[in-house]
Image: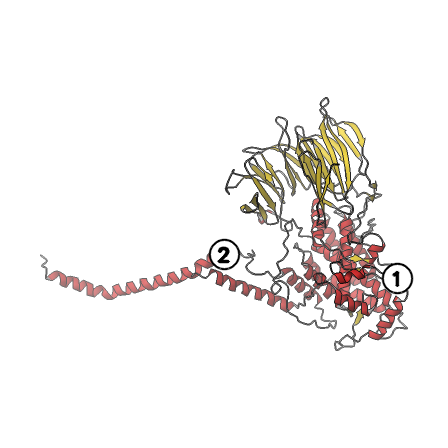
Amino acid sequence: WCVLPSRVLLVLTSQKGIQMYESDGSIMVYWHALDVTEHPPAQAVFARGIAAAGGRFICVGTSSGLVLVFDIPPKGTNITVSEVLEQHHDAITDIAAELGQAPDGAGDLVTADDAGTLCIWSTGEEFTLLSKIPAFGCCCASVKLWNGIVAAGYGNGQIRLYEVATGLLRAEVNAHARWIYALDLAPQTGKLLSGAEDSFVHVWKLSRNPDTDDVEIEHCHAECVTDTQVCGARFCDPEGNSFAVTGYDLSEIYCYGRA
Amino acid sequence: MVTEGELPARRQWRLSANLPAFLLTVARAVVLRCCLDVILIISLPVLCLFVCFPRGRRWGMGPAPDRGLARAGAGLARALACPHRPRRRLPIGPLVAGQQRRRRRRGSAVAMSARTLPLLFLNLGGEMLYILDQRLRAQSIPGEKARKDEWTDVDRKRVMNDIITTMFNKKFMEELFKPQELYSKKALRTVYDRLAHASIMRLNQASMDKLYDLMTMAFKYQVLLCPRPKDILLVTFNHLDAIKDFIRDSPGILNQVDETFRQLIETYSCLSAGEFQLIRQTLLIFFQDMHIRVSIFLKDKVQNSNGRFVLPISGPVPWGTEVPGLIRIFNHNGDEVKRTEFTTDGNYVTPQREGSFDLYGDRVLKLGTNMYSVSRPVETHMSDSSKNLASRAKENIVPNPLAKEELNFLARLLGGLEIKEPGGSETGFRLNLFTTDEEEEHAALTRPEELSYKVINIEATQVRTVFQTFDSHHSALLRTKFHPE
């Protein structure tokens, strides 16, 4: 779901293209077919990574590394591709927009790819690349952006926190023993949720030390979803007091709440 | 001066002189116009078609036949066409996939890798060979004591050699390694059905079903428990190492397997972790919702009684991953300023070394090695979707010491009975994957409908006919839809 100030759209990605529906799912507002010729023959073609940014844009990543920026009018189906961002060389894994308050001059959109490279952008009529965080050899599967901090989950089970303004690494957590599939952030409290293939779900608390301006992260809670590879995890409320988890081969969604 | 009387005459003359030419011109114009109209009427819809619906794009006007099935059948049919070995002709049956079934093909709304098929095929093939080898060994009689209709070691080696030769056939491997989507479950099942019958061995439907269940659950387990996505390759190498051991006395086939090994290394070594994860996810989607219980897994406590696999939360972490627990904080200069730790229920340790991705080497990973090498009966149980099967839920934990004797007795009784003589001196040998023949029959009767695999019989000529039929059906639909009214 992409929540824009003027409307809410349901955006779906698939192997063939991108679909956008009205919030009740009744009408397909837009369809964008992916250009197969852009990709080398053996490569899979798909779209991955969706975020609403800048108040009126929806960004969707593709398997060729391009990020498509769609300009969404407040009403109607006149959606156009306003820009194509070409900074990544590998398939896009996730895109995140600022959930809290970005510091002045800091970017409000981050894109991640298969190689682990992160790009920070500032949104607007034209999207500008502010900084590029190089990969360290591992795929970045999931990103979240909050108050000028990028939280990135990697395939080797690490969560890394970067400063948006400088692009520097501020915290490194050996969080999981397997691939991190899902990250979610509760914007009101700065709680971070991470779910991985090792069947664990962790809740962390992000904060900024007012004296040193250091980014801090502490572990709040661990939950083991027995014999399940966690594929999706989301907070159910903006404070982060409850979350839902889903996994491979699981036909149920497990909800956890604070006692 | 022109008088009134003269003018009409002149006009008349001009008119009469030009009339035939005029009429001819008019006639020509009319004919030309008619021809143009006809051409326009025919070509415009056709042009519209080509513009709106370029070739190759399916628009769901009719049920799409299983192209994977046809392709698989064609590839394997070509591979199996070895003129020097007497083969039993397969019965030509109707093509049931897609067209007649009218079941909507389950589409995938997630990204799928186009490089998954070789890994799927080779690993499932490897599992099949493990199981067949174990069953053949369990049923074999020492050469000098065996009668004509009993399994001997020589027969076993021959069956293994024949199947491995067919599996690694050069043309089939070429077809397999082309980037393509996965075959459907039915298509894949048909391929293995043909493969299992590539030699003198015969399997009944129930035994074949059981074999396929065991194969798929074993590989699903291996994919699920792979520490890193790249370790799927190590699992494949484990299977290939074991296959090379089966045929170590036959240098010709060994060469074929080595060739495939090299092709695997060439195709997959350069892929990134993200691409491997995509391959792994494609495989997991293929195996989704399969929860058949296997007694060897239940006994070893790797599978729960509800059919789901146990995911361990202890042991070595994957190569390249740190043991969870450490948090490091850095300041704006990049210096580490704080270290904290957290604890979880998990109990992980650092790994010793990385497995080898070369042609030869220690793979380190145990997934993909032969777990049937200890001789014990392996049973499968369907998920309890049917009430009838609930009573069979109690698995046979204690191996029956009389099992081997029963098999020998049955082999003597039944050997060669059901097999049609192919006209030569060859006789087929039936292999039973169950402990008794009655069990095999019972399994065939009580198998739940949703878990039954309908084997499709295909021959190469049929495949071509299928495509022609599809094309003509397609064009017929086109004409009906777009004929101008």
Residue B182 percent location from the top left of the image: 67, 56
Q: Chain of mark 1?
A: B
Q: Quadrant of residue A50?
A: top right
Mark 1 Cα-neighbour bin, 10 Å: few <14, some 14–19, many ≥20 = few
Q: Quadrant of residue B469?
A: bottom right
Q: Which residue is mark 1?
A: B399
Q: Secondary structure at mark 2?
A: helix
Q: Are marks 2 and 1 on the same chain?
A: yes
Is A206 on the left or on the right of B3, as rendered? Answer: right
Residue A193 percent location from the top left of the image: 72, 37
- Asked whether B235 or A109 is in front, the reply is A109
Find residue B50 and name its label.
Answer: 2
Between marks 2 and 1, how big is the CA–CA gap?
A: 65 Å
Residue A238 percent location from the top left of the image: 66, 34
- Residue shown at 76% from the left, 34% from the top: A220
Give the position of the N terminus of chain B as an image quadrant: bottom left
Q: Amino acid at mark 2?
A: Phe
Mark 2 Cα-neighbour bin, 10 Å: few <14, some 14–19, many ≥20 = few
Q: Chain of mark 2?
A: B
Q: Secondary structure at mark 1?
A: loop
Q: Is residue B476 above or below residue A163?
A: below
Q: Is residue B57 above or below residue A32?
A: below
- Residue shown at 70% from the left, 73% from the top: B89
Q: Is residue B211 above or below residue A35?
A: below
Q: Amino acid at mark 1?
A: Pro
Q: Is residue B125 visible?
A: no
Dot in front, 2 or 1: 1
Q: How many marks?
A: 2
- Asked whether A82 or B265 is in front, the reply is A82
Give the position of the C terminus of chain B as an image quadrant: bottom left
